[in-house]
Image: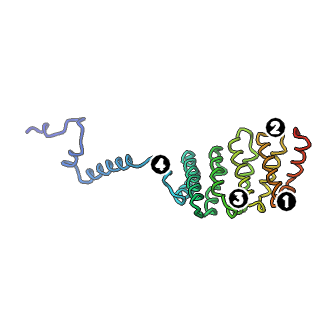
Amino acid sequence: MSAGSGEKRRGARVTTSDVGQNGSPAMTSAIGLAHGSRQDHAREPPLGQRISDMSFGQTFAMLHEEARGGIRDRHTGRKLLHQVIRVCKAAIRAGRKQDHGLALEILCPYTVVRDSVLRSTCFRALRYVVHTPEAARAFGSMRLVLPLARSLDRDHQYLLERTEALKLVRAVVQLAPSFAPRALVRSVVVLAQTPGESLRQACMDTLLTWAGDARTLRAMVSCNGIDTLASAVIDPEC
């Protein structure tokens, strides 16, 4: 047999069987691992499906990891926040108690991200986290009040975010009216006083609801809410 007949032709394709017969064990093992990793990756469910299967604790653990990394992946953040809404709804229906303090602390960084849709989704998720008077009081004592008030005061182009912020304010005050944060009440009063404001009527309705509850009346008086309602009755166009 000639020397040329025993050599591989230049450019010929080398298969795993060739390596297994002529190559080193290390090379054979490396190729096997590569094939296995590709198969595992193909069997791995998509990110959306993995997130939708997460429990309450797993979802908040991943949210915490995303926050520590600077919340670079907004798409993943939104999916995780939607999963928070799903698991909180399920917990409310089942009557299960959850650690709202930890949940509020983990969601706090998502209220100050640059993406307005992500902030809006976070406020919506917070409404389902804050569903008890204890959670509402904890909310008022944490550093979530200022981002919420700031979102209420944004420009008209952030209507979705401002609407979700107002819904959260109403939920917090309704659950714990005696502990209503003055900054939130004052923000609603200012919007109700502003002519041409897109949320003015919603804020007026909110003030009317609060005025009918003796527990929120003190906050209304201190933030000039009663005078605002009276002025609206006397001159609706003001």
Q: Nearer the viewer, mark 1 or mark 4?
A: 1
Image position of 199 with respect to 214: above or below: above
Q: Nearer the viewer, mark 4 or mark 3?
A: 4
Q: In the depicted view, which residue is nearer to us: 76 or 124?
A: 124
Q: Earlier in the sequence, mark 1 or mark 3?
A: 3
Q: Earlier in the sequence, mark 3 or mark 2?
A: 3
Which quarter of the image is occupied by the C terminus? Answer: top right
Mark 1 and mark 2: Cα distance apart in space: 28 Å
Which kind of residue does numbered mark 2 sit on? Gly
Residue 86 in the image, given as x and y percentages of width and height = 56, 52
Numbered mark located on residue 218 in the image: 1
Residue linked to disc 3: 143
Please report the residue visible at 70 percent of the width from the left and 62 percent of the height from the top: 133
Q: In the depicted view, which residue is nearer to us: 67 or 107?
A: 107
Residue linked to disc 4: 49
Please report the residue visible at 35 percent of the width from the left and 47 percent of the height from the top: 38
Mark 1 and mark 4: Cα distance apart in space: 48 Å
